[in-house]
Image: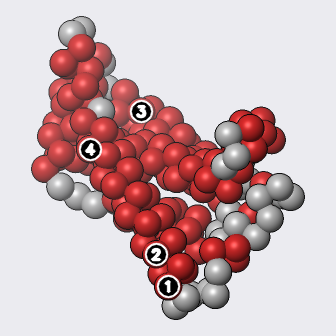
Amino acid sequence: MRAGSIIRLFQAGLVAACAQLMAVAMAALLVFLVTRSGLIAPTLAEICPNAESLPASVSPLLTWIYLLTAIGIALTSNHFVDFTAAHIRRASRLMQPAEPDHASKALLVQLWLAAIGFAILTLRSPPHAWIEVGRYYEGACAASIAWSGGMSIGLACFGANAHAARKAF
């Protein structure tokens, strides 16, 4: 199987990941600008009150924005999802002509499990090593925010591919 064929099987996820990356950047910028102007909180310290203390200093608002936008992007139907679903359907039928939906159902389960895992990781604190790397570069708060943003990108990617796999049968 050529690389182009494999990319077609995951195109919906790649497009969703790019869309979520833009959403993460825009949400972070918007929250920081609104916070700095004093509309949400008097200072930026409420987003990251004490970067040297717990890794749970990530703003719950930003984390929930990341999670909800990732779910929305993953569940959005568009031509990329339809295109990916058609390729998953074709590949599934080529793999097992006797049970044409078996492979796409197995893929659906695996992709949804990965998406659920990323959703859980989005809401959790980052690993201690991730925070320590952030502290080393004097950005423990940014490391925490980047963790939840990165995990939401994974959620959007795997969720969109799962959506395409569901449409494949």
Q: For this rendering, which residue is in front, 71 or 138?
A: 138
Disc 3 residue type (three-letter): Leu
Disc 1 residue type (three-letter): Ser
User: In this rendering, is residue 5 above or below 105?
Assistant: above
Mark 2 or mark 4, whichever is nearer to me: 2
Q: Element type at marker 3? A: helix
Instruction: Name the colour scheme.
Output: secondary structure
User: In this rendering, is residue 146 above or below 136?
Assistant: below
Q: Which residue is mark 1?
A: 37
Q: Which residue is mark 2?
A: 33
Q: Position of residue 99 (x, y in %)?
A: 31, 26
Q: Which residue is mark 3?
A: 107
Query: Is disc 2 in contact with disc 1, using a CB cutoff of under 8 Å?
Result: yes
Residue extending farthest to the top is: 1
Q: Element type at marker 4? A: helix
Query: Is disc 3 in contact with disc 1, using a CB cutoff of under 8 Å?
Result: no
Disc 2 residue type (three-letter): Leu
Q: Which residue is mark 4?
A: 15
Disc 4 residue type (three-letter): Val
Q: Element type at marker 2? A: helix
Q: Position of residue 27 (x, y in %)?
A: 43, 67
Q: Position of residue 58 (x, y in %)?
A: 68, 63
Q: Is residue 138 left or right of residue 73?
A: right
Disc 3/disc 4 C-alpha distance (Å): 19 Å
Q: Is residue 74 left or right of residue 115?
A: left
Tell me which label, 4 or 1, sits earlier in the chain: 4
